[in-house]
Image (cartoon, grey):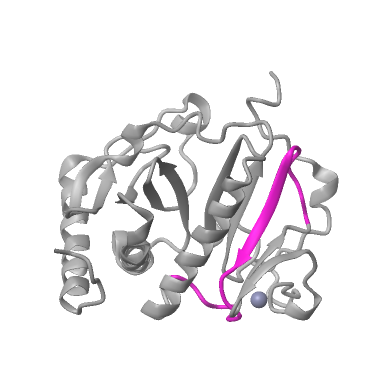
Amino acid sequence: MSNKDVLVFEIEQAKGKPRDIKKKADYCPFCDTEHLTNVIDQKDDMIWLENKFKTLQDTNQTIVIESHDHNGDISNYSVAKNREVFNYIYDCWNQMIQTKKYQSVLMYKNFGPMSGGSLRHPHFQIIGLDKVNGYKHVEPENFTGMKVFENKHIDVNISEKPVMGFVEFNIVINNPKYLDDLAEFARVTVKYILDDFYGGKFDSYNIFFYRDGRKIICKLTARYVVSPYFVGYRLSQRDGDKQMGEIAKVLLEKFHRLVKSAEINNLE
Ligand SMILES: [Zn+2]
């Protein structure tokens, strides 16, 4: 198998990587902004920098620190702050894509102990892959599904063919100019995942971004122990129609409150 097909992990580089989730006394490098190195760009308290611990071969691993607040999260940002974060990460991601130096550029976020993240401080990852097409196993059907909300330029649905499963929310805008709305729908969905979804039993989530022409797709999913069906057979799972319908209904009620409160501008 060539490096075109897999990401190669380098253990030496991972040594000394700070992990603060289990040991709360550990030092947080993202709070200590004065000692950050290899900063690429900064806007207010958001900082784009190179990842000090480059664990993957043939990649450019970068990080966007979202906020100076160690305990900040999409679920507790103000509407304005959250929109700033989404606009900034999009700009950084787009800049990296525009360099045309990479086979593909991934952007995603880990939150919580089950998400694969090692630092609590809120951040996104933007990774340029020199040789690997990171989108090879993702298909358009992974972004469609049971409708939650839809208008002329935004579509929110629950995957009927998730990448892994089991409940994946897709927020699709047909043009980057609607990023503010995407940010709002994502904020409400993250809050729903952490507070309400299955009685609030989840403390971890992931967000992934994809592009398809001018379309921007944001996939949000609660995290749990990965199913052996996926580990051994790459078989994804989804909830049954009835359960999905109930989730869609509750989430739509939250969106309606959002629309009524006029935090969304372009919903005609
Ligand atoms: Zn911190």
Left or right: residue 103 versus residue 183 is right
Left or right: residue 30 versus residue 247 is right
Task: Residue at 21% x, 68% y: name it.
Answer: 254
Rendered image quadrant of residue 229: top left
Rendered image quadrant of residue 9: top right
Is residue 77 visible in the rendered image? The answer is no
**Percent x, y of residue 92:** 57, 59
**Percent x, y of residue 175:** 33, 52
Quarter of the image for the C terminus: give it.
Answer: bottom left
**Percent x, y of residue 111:** 52, 62
Range shown magenta: 53-74
Task: Residue at 16% x, 66% y: name it.
Answer: 253
Is residue 42 visible in the rendered image? The answer is yes
- Considering only vertical position in the picture, is 252 above or below 132? below
Q: Ligand 1 is located in which of the four quadrants?
A: bottom right
Left or right: residue 198 versus residue 94 is left
Count all numbered tags in the image, as a single digit.
0
